[in-house]
Image (spheres, rainbow, N blue to C red):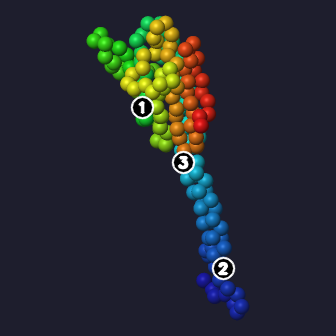
Amino acid sequence: MTRAGCGQRWPQGGFTLIEVMVVLLIIGVMATTVSFSLRPDTHRQLEDESYRLARVLEQAVDAAEMGEALALDWQAGGARWRVADSQGGWQPSADAFFADHLLPEGLRGDGLLQDGRPASGPVRLWQDGRPPALALTLRGESGARSITLSPVGTVTVEVAP
């Protein structure tokens, strides 16, 4: 190798400080974007869980009307579907569709009202030839949804106060 002449420099390798800072800035923006996209969207979870519960409740009322002794045991952690056994007690449903369903983290269930009064324990979904009037509430960081079952068997989801 020959030496560069007077006033000439060997070509330098590497990156300038500005180039390194730009790359770090881009990596930081990308990491922030990924972290925000991985966070659970509690508003969407609240909507999804409300409508999911409403559809399962409609199906449970239909099954109860057809003769299956089904009950809803509503708790803060989620819905538990129960079937009457031969001794008059309540057992978990063997049907996978009516399996116990825990609410996602960040959501909770508030009290169950039957005909306007607080209900505890499993509530039978077909009584005296009709479904009971039920109201329950799902709460999350972004708000609350009220799920109501009317005596004619329709289920509605509304924004709760």
Label 1: how many Cα within 10 Å (few below 14, some 14–19, many 20+): some
Depicted 115 relative to depicted 20: above or below? above
Q: Is residue 69 left or right of residue 22?
A: left
* Secondary structure under the numbered disc 3 in the rendered image: loop
Q: Tell me if mark 2 has few (under 14), some (14-19) or many (20+) residues whose alpha carbon lies within 10 angstroms of its own.
A: few
Q: Which residue is mark 1?
A: 75
Q: Is residue 101 visible?
A: no
Residue 3 visible within the image:
yes
Mark 3 vs 1, N-terminal side: 3
Badge 3: residue crowd in 10 Å (few <14, some 14–19, many ≥20): few
**Residue 39: mark:** 3
User: Label 3 amino acid?
Assistant: Arg
Q: Say whether residue 38 is left or right of residue 95.
A: right
Q: Quadrant of residue 26?
A: bottom right
In the picture, the quarter occupied by the C terminus is top right
Q: How many marks?
A: 3
Residue at far bottom of view:
6
Camera-side mark, 3 or 2: 3
| Residue depicted at x 43% and y 25% | 119
User: What's under tag 1, amino acid-wise?
Assistant: Gln
Which residue is depicted at the point 42% across and 10% down? 68
The residue under the point 52% across, 19% down is 133
Q: Nearer the viewer, mark 1 or mark 2?
A: 1
Residue, disc 2? 11
Lower sequence index among marks 3 and 2 = 2
Residues under labels 3 and 1: Cα distance?
26 Å
Look at the image and tell me in which quarter the N terminus lies: bottom right
> 132 or 155, which lies in front?
132
**Farthest residue in the right direction?**
7
